[in-house]
Amino acid sequence: MRRPSRFSRRARRRLGTLLRRLVLGLFALWCLFPVYWLATMSLKTPVEAASRNPSFLFRPILDNYRAVLDRPEIWGYFVNSSIVALGSTALVLLIGVPCAYALGRYRFRGAADFGFWILTTRMTPPVAVLIPFYVLYVRTGLVDTRAGLILAHVALNLSIAVWLMKGFFEDLPPELEEAALVDGATRWQAFRDIALPVAVPGIAAVAILCFLFSWNEFLFSLVLAGSTVRTVPLGLYSFIGYQQIDWGSLSASAVLLLAPVLVILVLFGRHLVRGLTLGAVK
Amino acid sequence: MAAARSRPRPEAAARRRFVLLMLLPATALLLAVTLFPFLWAFAMSLTDLALTRPGQTRFVGLANYADHLASPDFWRAARVTALFTLLAVSIQLVLGVGLAVLLHRETRGAWAWRLAFLLPMAITPVAAIFTFRMMFHPSIGVFNAILRDLGLPPVDWLGTPGMALVSLLIVDCWQWTPFVLLIAAGGLASLDPEPLEAAEVDGATPWQVLRDHTLPMLAPFLAVAVVFRAIDAFKTFDIIFVLTGGGPGVATRTLNLLAYKQGIEFLSIGYAAALAIVMLVVTIVAAQLFLRRTGFFRPRAAL
């Protein structure tokens, strides 16, 4: 066996780092490219946007944004989406955290089957339940209301939230809670005062995920929301329907409607990554 | 211990009550909002309910199911669905894990990398899919412009059966590879580095360390990623609906799109419900087999 000299080993390591960054950089570029392209389209004139030779260099114009902001309904979409996403996220946590704790921390008969049943609620093809959902909503007056959408999004996101948080609680060492129980704390106190504070980063990550999933949800909102509680994705979809050719103003609406997601990512992305990394998913 | 022995019965009852109360809200909500519509859908699948003939619904037993299993449309859609799910999940698994391993070696700026990788799965799918539709456009799309600049012939991204499936896979992988990457990265960060370092000291090559130590330790994390990805890929709707609508012809028509067409467009509710139930049964069986094989249900530290 020939040992590589010190120099060549260092050169090789440097080459490895370079290659690694190249691969990661290419992938990052690929992840960002569609968003970049959408942004450039929104800053082009209709002629440039429909050019057979799409240009990377052009004079940006803001006309498309002016045209979009002239529509008053766009603010309504924001309000609806914000209320629905915040409301459903809060409710998912309120209901999901205790359930995840019991599943992750307590051994009881049928626990595995119960956990699997929660997972099956995510497996059901939407087409199967959309029509019963719709009829149910019409009968109970929930159709085309924010409360109705909140409830639907809770049902959609509860399973993934419970499964992720179950993993966090399983990963926490149980000794602290055991000690508290021996010291006479109730089980509820052990949960609230000891397990819960430690799990906060993980719960925050799940909250961000649920918010994004709810903000982006399309199919259930399409069927269960009427004209009064249109959310952001529905608004965007309705724009696509109206104007097949005007790529520019369509792109501008898409950028505006994406803006909150980007803000959330930049502000809270760190917590999302850290939370998922901390307990990860087991 | 005396304390432990002096509280057998009432303590067990209190424990059970606590667990029940913690599970109750989620159970009640899921029962109300998912089980009830599901049972309803099952009941409808046993009838010939069609909104085109109101008031003439009859109980037909399992006839809808028999019809599906005898129909070439069903089997064609099943093949497309299986192919799409299998390819999407395997590509995303390989890419996601590979990139996570590379990312794990980046000590500085990991946070900025992750922000870029997070973007596709956070972005509103309708907006992303619309963007891809622009980029796939045969004459004014940027993909073909890039190919033209490279001196390559243009590609009809969504127009031919084979290419349409590839294009759908491109979009699905763009959107969801980051999900696998994130879970794998989280798993890598939480692994005990000691066995890995020991193997390196013993002279194992990086590839051997990855194959013999890192990947087996990462397996539980990857199992979760695969389960969630497979469940969602199996019932992918928006990407296919907006980009190809199942076409050209029926080349990319998955089971989910077939069910949508029959239920929402042709209004044959009973027939579509039966198809959806078949899909659910397939998913449940596949997930059970997979999770049991991977030892997912083994109990862990408990109170």
Image (spheres, rainbow, N blue to C red):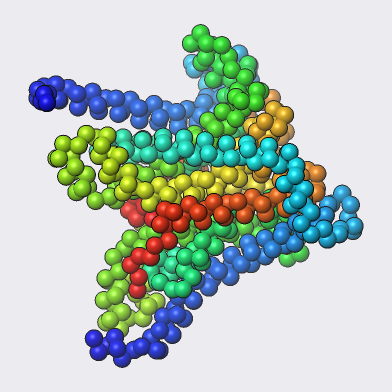
Q: Position of residue A159 (x, y in %)?
A: 52, 58
Quadrant of the image containing the C terminus of chain A:
bottom left
Left of B134 or right of it: where is B182? left
Q: Is residue B192 visible?
A: yes
- Kindly give the residue lying farthest to the bottom in the view shown: B6
Left of A4 or right of it: where is A109? right
Q: Position of residue B294 (x, y in %)?
A: 42, 53
Q: Pick whichever, B127 or B159, lies toward us.
A: B159
Above or below B31: residue A66: above
Above or below A182: residue B258: above
Quadrant of the image containing the N terminus of chain A:
top left
Left of A233 or right of it: where is B62? right
Q: Position of residue B129 (x, y in %)?
A: 59, 34
Residue lying at 35% horizontally and 70% vertically, measured from the top left: B302
- Kindly give the residue lying farthest to the top in the view shown: B151
Residue lying at 62% horizontally and 57% vertically, measured from the top left: A152
Quadrant of res A18:
top left
Above or below A176: residue A71: above
Residue lying at 37% horizontally and 72% vertically, measured from the top left: A191
Total number of numbered discs in the rendering: 0
Residue lying at 44% horizontally and 54% vertically, measured from the top left: B293
Q: Is residue A169 visible?
A: no
Q: Position of residue B226 (x, y in %)?
A: 46, 46
Quadrant of res B198:
top left
